[in-house]
Amino acid sequence: MKTKIFLNLAVKDLNRAVKFFNELGFSTNPKFTNEQGACIVISDNIFTMLLVEEFYQTFTPKKICDSTTTSEVLISLSMESREKVDETIEKAVKAGGTDYQEAKDYGWMYQRTFLDLDGHHWEVFFMDESQIPTN
């Protein structure tokens, strides 16, 4: 099995969170989905496990942070174009997320940010590696 990433996120309302990510164009894997959690397929090797807070808490003795006021992680996803970055942000906002920061254009990289319904911070970017400055 190739290495895959399963990003586990605590959510307050599972159905609402699943609907949000489905509206961004990501599918749900029913094999790993029940009333306690859902597997959102981002790509062949990247998955987000949305876990209701009570279930999430069974995996760690640490307190779950309030991600609307505390930064827990910056999740970054690369896209195939600047247009796809903008399209993803538009979908996130339409689905109830927040366009969190102004777009950043570094010439070789274009980046935008959204917060999902539970306040998790998502960086969406396009990078043209051939244009990265060498100095």
Image (cartoon, helix red, strand yellow):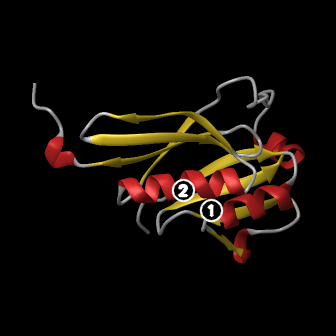
Q: Quadrant of residue 79?
A: bottom left
Residue 11 in the image, given as x and y percentages of width and height? 80, 46
The residue where tag 2 is placed is 88
How packed mark 1 is, by other alpha carbons closer than 10 Å (few <14, some 14-19, many 20 or more), is some
Quadrant, the C terminus: top left
Q: Is residue 100 above or below residue 6?
A: above
Residue type at mark 1 is: Leu
Q: Does label 1 or label 2 sit earlier along the sequence?
A: 1
> Is 84 drawn above or below residue 108 in the view shown?
below
Q: Residue 67 placed where, x, y %?
A: 73, 31
Residues at marks 1 and 2 touching, judged by CB atoms closer than 8 Å = yes
Question: Which of the two residues, 81 or 70, is positioned nearer the viewer here?
Answer: 81
**Residue 24 in the image, given as x and y percentages of width and height:** 62, 62
Instruction: Pick the quarter of the image with the N terminus.
Output: bottom left
The residues bearing labels 1 and 2 have C-alpha atoms spaced at a distance of 6 Å
Residue under pointer 1: 24
Residue extending farthest bottom: 31
Q: Residue at x 72, y 69 (%)?
A: 32
